[in-house]
Amino acid sequence: MTDPARPAQALALAGGWCWFDRIEVLERGMPARIIPASDAPADVIARLIAPRAMLAGLALDRPRIMGILNVTPDSFSDGGRFLDPARALDQGRKMAEDADLLDIGGESTRPGAPAVSVQQEIARTAPVIAALREAGLALPISIDTRKADVAEAAMAAGAQVVNDVSGLVYDPALAGLVARHDVPVCVMHARGTPETMQAEADYDDVLLDVYDGLADCVARAVAAGIARDRILVDPGIGFAKTGVHNLALIARLSLFHGMGCPILLGASRKRFIGTYGGAEAPDQRMPGSVAVALAGVAQGAQVVRVHDVAETRQALRVWLSLRTAGADRMPSQKPDEFSQGETKSPLGSAGGL
Ligand code: HH2
């Protein structure tokens, strides 16, 4: 919940901007039921309330915007626009004005996309990361790859987060590399490969199947020596999912806080936004993408991965200002440090909001 009318006994979710005083219990084959938070097992509550660790120097007690920069000829929405390194550099610098971190990718993972060779993926991504660093960009950079060699080259060039859409399945060497470098990693739920995944969009219970799949990813990461507080989880919107699956996952995204890890939501300009929003072309899907990002933030998602960084930043600022307005009418509630910052300075700085 984000309503300013917050009951005194409510608990802060993940040390952030949402609160809760009840829990919806989802079980396979059973109707959902709601219980008071005070009836939930202590270990569940502990995972839900624990403040999340910093992400490459970014505190996650406020929503963070990850700007997407695809250095590819064929990404579904910005393919070809930033393949030229000079253009990629310009776009990265522009996005850095409003983003908290950048996600650089050199291989499209849209449904049906063919795999790209390691050499080609490195040649697309590492020079752009190095150029962004040479240009003085200080914000964290994440490398969007399934491959250890690509991640290694990106880290040598200045990236310090790994984002793997295969959830550490595709390349068995990636988890060990992440562990050795002790960097944060986002594990995303997917099935199959981009070429095959849409045939695997079949679930008994999409929320619980994706939850269990992500729990396996987290267990795999921990078994490889990655510290649990270095892991972000992502339900993988559009990866082996139909539009109905995507809506179900976003509508109950807060379920994933139960894993005790920060949540990353990547829905920007994806097909279901066109379907439900009536926008055929990906570059017409900004308003729907902003709506979904806010829906995620309203459930406490710590990171939203977006193409339209400036528009998302503006929407977030206004949303956060509305959320904090009126909180001071609650006698039992002291505005937290974050809310005070928002109230005093709704425009904030690039690092905050
Ligand atoms: N989606 C895409 C790529 N990487 N990473 C995470 N963690 N979550 C996502 O939802 C996600 C992702 C696909 O989007 P995009 O990068 O815009 O397109 P393409 O794969 O065609 O380059």
Image: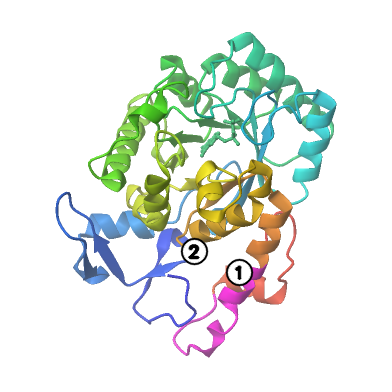
Query: Element under label 1?
Result: helix
Tell me the magenta residue range. Answer: 318-335
Relative horizontal placement of residue 9, taking residue 176 as reference (left or right): left
| Badge 2: residue crowd in 10 Å (few <14, some 14–19, many ≥20) | many
The quadrant holding residue 224 is: top left
| Badge 1: residue crowd in 10 Å (few <14, some 14–19, many ≥20) | many
Instruction: Name above or below for residue 344 compared with residue 254.
Output: below
Residue at x-position 54% and y-position 17%: 114
Quadrant containing ligand 1 reads top right
Relative horizontal placement of residue 217, taking residue 310 as reference (left or right): left
Cα–Cα span, label 2 and label 1: 10 Å
User: First in sequence: mark 2 or mark 1?
Assistant: 2
Residue type, numbered disc 2: Ala
Residue 20 in sight from this viewpoint: yes
Is residue 259 magenta-colored?
no
Instruction: Name above or below for residue 253 compared with residue 117.
Output: below
Residue at x-position 44% and y-position 42%: 234
- For label 2, the residue is 298
**Residues at circles 2 and 1 in contact by the CB criterion of under 8 Å:** no
Tell me the quadrant of the picture where the N terminus can be found.
bottom left
Residue 136 in sight from this viewpoint: no
Color theme of the render: rainbow
Query: Element under label 2?
Result: loop
